Structure formats: C-alpha cells, structure tokens
Image (cartoon, grey):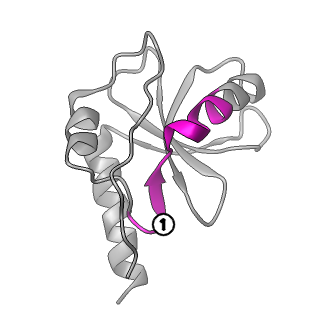
Amino acid sequence: MKTINMINIKRIDGFDYPMGYETIVDLNLVDFEYWYFIPDSQLDNRYNGMNERYPNRKYIPFARRDDNDDIACFEEGKGEKVFIVHDFADEGYEQRKTYDNIWQWMKAAIDELIEENQ
C-alpha cells in the first residue's frame, strides 16, 4: 500500500486559485494513483515549459497523470474550469477535456481509479 505524505503545493504568484483547490489541498486529497498534484519542486519547470509550448494560452498546471503527459490545469481568465492538456502535443491540439470545476475533475479522477481497480 502506498503511503501519501503531506506535500506543499506551490502557488503561481498572481493567480487566484478556486476555493475548491484550497479545500482539496488542505485535506491532502492530492494523490489518486493515476492523477497526483504536482509538487512544488516540479511546478515551476512544468509551468514555464507549458507557457513556452503554448504561448497563446496561460495554463496554470496543478496535477498530472502518472502514465502519460496529461496535465490538469486552470487557465488564467477562464474562472474555475479545469482543462486537461496533453503536454508536448502541437499547439492547438493539446486540449483533451474540460471540466466546469475542480470537483468535476476530481470526481472523474476518482472514477478512473475505481474502474481500474475493479
């Protein structure tokens, strides 16, 4: 069984994270086997890289999928929506899915975990 340690989640300066994000981090609900929140030691690299690869979007990454290059992101100016971006895809083809908010994304992440473990 995997042990989940409390991790600090680095925030991108100047971005107002949705309330749900704060709640999820405070409760340490940050690892769903396939999806996990990006630890602060990796966030700057991912944030800067995504903004270089996709200069027409302002992605704020917060979680990644362990088995591929999918990244869960907020986007500056898009409210609470969560975008699933297949990082390293050609610009304009990177967006895979959109959720209305972090709770919908979290439900989908947990549903994936359940389906894969039945």
Q: Residue at x 54, y 51 (%)?
A: 64
Q: Name the spot of residue 44 as percent of width and height, x first.
A: 61, 29
The residue segment tinted magenta is 32-47
Question: Relative to the observer, which residue lies in front, 8 or 90?
Answer: 8
Where does label 1 land, which residue? 34
- Whether 116 is among the magenta residues is no
Q: Above or below — where is 114 with respect to 21?
A: below
Left or right, 17 with reference to 53? left
Q: Residue at x 36, y 63 (%)?
A: 4
- Whether 34 is among the magenta residues is yes
Kind of residue sitting beneath label 1: Tyr
Q: Name the spot of residue 10 as percent of width and height, x first.
A: 45, 30
Q: Residue furthest bottom?
A: 118
Q: Residue at x 40, y 70 (%)?
A: 112
Q: Above or below — where is 115 with respect to 98?
A: below
Q: Examine the image and state in which quarter residue 32 appears.
A: bottom left
